[in-house]
Amino acid sequence: MHAEQPRSYEPGPSARFRRWFRKLAANLTVITADSGRPYAPRRVVELARYDVPTPFELEARTMRTARVLQLTS
């Protein structure tokens, strides 16, 4: 299953996705990614970390660290 939409930008949608991911994690492996957003899941195992170039005009920086995360139940 692949949920391709912002999950960590705002508290409301982030909370809904966290609840859904936690339910899934009880029976499945749930892997997501985070690039340092404020509402990313906390109970995770970091699987990988990458420095990703970003447009300065969009992010106010030229590099952002993205993490690949596995949720724990």
Image (spheres, grey):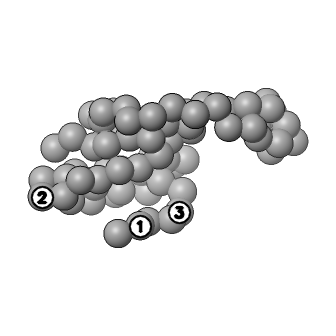
Marks 2 and 3, the one that precedes in the sequence: 3
- Number of numbered discs: 3
Q: Which mark is residue 2?
A: 1
Residue labelled with disc 3? 5
Q: Secondary structure at mark 2?
A: loop
Marks 1 and 2, the one that precedes in the sequence: 1
Q: Where in the figure is residue 52, as x and y percent of width and height?
A: 68, 37
Residue labelled with disc 2? 27
The quadrant the N terminus occupies is: bottom left
Q: Is residue 52 left or right of residue 12?
A: right
Residue 53 seen in the figure: yes
Residue 33 vs 17, above or below: the answer is above
Q: Is residue 73 left or right of residue 46?
A: left
Could you tell me the amino acid type at mark 2? Asn
Could you tell me the amino acid type at mark 1? His
Residue drawn at the location 58% of the way across and 34% of the way down: 50
Quarter holding residue 37: top right
Q: Secondary structure at mark 1?
A: loop
**Circle 2 or circle 3, nearest the eye:** 2
Q: Secondary structure at mark 3?
A: loop
Q: Where in the figure is residue 69, as x and y percent of width and height?
A: 38, 40
Q: Which mark is residue 56?
A: none
Q: Residues within 10 Å of mark 3 (few under 14, many from 20)?
A: few
Could you tell me the amino acid type at mark 3? Gln
Q: In front: 42, or 55?
A: 55
Q: Where in the figure is residue 27, as x and y percent of width and height?
A: 12, 58
Residue drawn at the location 83% of the way across and 42% of the way down: 55
Quarter holding residue 73: top left
Residue at mark 1 to residue at mark 2: CA–CA distance: 16 Å
Residue 64 vs 31, above or below: the answer is above
**Circle 1 or circle 3, nearest the eye:** 1
Q: In front: 52, or 35?
A: 52
